[in-house]
Amino acid sequence: MNTTQIGWIGLGKMGIPMVQNLIKATYPVMVYNRNHAKTEIFSTQGLQVAESPAALFDSCDVVILMIADDSAVEAVFNGLDGLFTSSATGKIIINMSTVSPAISNKMALLCTERGNYYIDAPVSGSVKQATDGSLVDHGGRCASSF
């Protein structure tokens, strides 16, 4: 079993099969979704469900985001109980969402200022590729002050 605790935010059409692939690879995964009903499939499988992005951030080594758009990214990072309400440092945040370069640059800078790593890694593909594990990344970039 892998020991890196992964936190996953975003359980839409792409996020659910991607989390299922992490489970198959024996990673311990904690999930969060704004619509808590979407977490039920995982809680019945025994996965931990976080009450907020901040709670997930505190508990996980790596946090992966697969969410809808710029405003959702902003809310996950800076909203009530967002990632940045936590004082955790040294965490790795991987944003796989397809969002604007402006929001990615903003979040990368804020992560660096708070002592965390940010990787912008949007993916191309559909639900089929997410399910069979063949999504293509767009050559992510990493930002950190370490």
Image (spheres, helix red, strand yellow):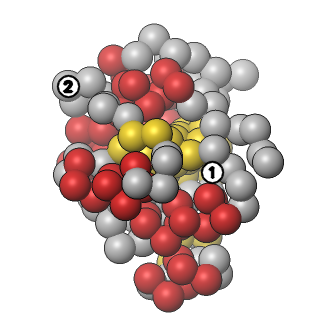
Residue picked out by circle 1: 141
Say whether residue 141 is left or right of residue 48: right
Residue 62: image x %, image y %?
60, 38
Q: Earlier in the sequence, mark 1 or mark 2?
A: 2
Q: Nearer the viewer, residue 106 or 97?
A: 97
SS of the residue under disc 1: strand
Q: Residue furthest bottom?
A: 128
Q: Quadrant of the C terminus?
A: top right
Instruction: Name the residue at 44% across, 82% down.
Output: 127
Which residue lies at the image location 60% right of the left edge and 27% below the top edge? Answer: 91
Q: Locate residue 81, reporting x and y percent.
A: 26, 24
Task: Compare residues 29 and 65 and report the one nearer the observer.
Answer: 29
Q: Nearer the viewer, mark 1 or mark 2?
A: 2
Q: Residues within 10 Å of mark 2 (few under 14, many from 20)?
A: few
Residue 26 is drawn in which quadrant?
bottom right
Instruction: Residue 37: tell me if it is visible.
Output: yes
